[in-house]
Amino acid sequence: MIPAFDSLGRLPPGIHTASWKQIEAAFGFTGRRKQLLQGLREALVLLKTAGCRLVYLDGSFVTSKPAPGDFDACWAVDGVVVDELDPVFLDFSHGRARQKERFGGEFFPADLPEGETGRTFLEFFQTDKETGDAKGIVVIDLTRWRP
């Protein structure tokens, strides 16, 4: 379930499990957001096909911001068959331009260290970059997700 936004428009700290319908209802409230959801859906299909079980959603997309520029996501590597993974998920060149162009957002392996902090992306996503405060993210369980 996706909880209400806090006074700063963020999710409360924690990893919040959500169904696709809950994600559409909570985050698809503008045309721009609906467009980003389409790209996210395409990426989830590809990740699920490769055996991915969990995808964590972050960025301004999981806030109350009406027109987020993109979304940020990281995916659990356990169970992923690399030979079946679309190469775009491993292409970090040019600021992940191919990912942004194709899906409208960026994807990182969840256990990969983020460059500046050294924390895994899963840990990094749970901290507000501006304040250092803990914040919430959303997890999508692809084992239960049906496109």
Image (tube, rainbow, N blue to C red):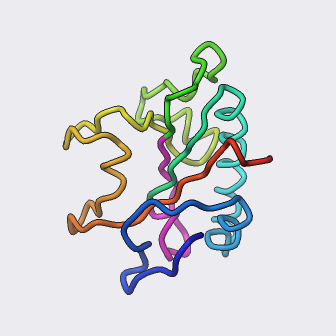
At horizontal 34% and vertical 57% (from top left) the residue drawn is 126
Quarter of the image for residue 128 reads bottom left
Q: Nearer the viewer, residue 125 or 67?
A: 125
- Locate residue 56, reporting x and y percent: 50, 49
Asked if residue 71 is among those painted magenta in the image, a careful observer would answer yes
Q: Is residue 126 above or below residue 133?
A: above
Quarter of the image for residue 99 reads top right
Given the current orientation, which residue lies at the most extreme top position? 83
At horizontal 62% and vertical 13% (from top left) the residue drawn is 83
21 relative to 133 in the view: left or right:
right
Q: Nearer the viewer, residue 128 or 79?
A: 79
At horizontal 72% and vertical 52% (from top left) the residue drawn is 38
Q: How many marks?
A: 0
Q: Is residue 2 above or below residue 89?
A: below
Where, quadrant-wise, is the N terminus in this rendering? bottom right
- Locate residue 16, reporting x and y percent: 51, 63
- Locate residue 75, reporting x and y percent: 51, 38
- Locate residue 68, reporting x and y percent: 51, 65
Quarter of the image for residue 2 reads bottom right
Q: Is residue 62 above or below residue 140?
A: below
Given the current orientation, which residue lies at the most extreme bottom position? 7
Asked if residue 84 is among those painted magenta in the image, a careful observer would answer no
Q: Nearer the viewer, residue 143 or 10?
A: 143
Q: Which residues are magenta?
A: 60-74
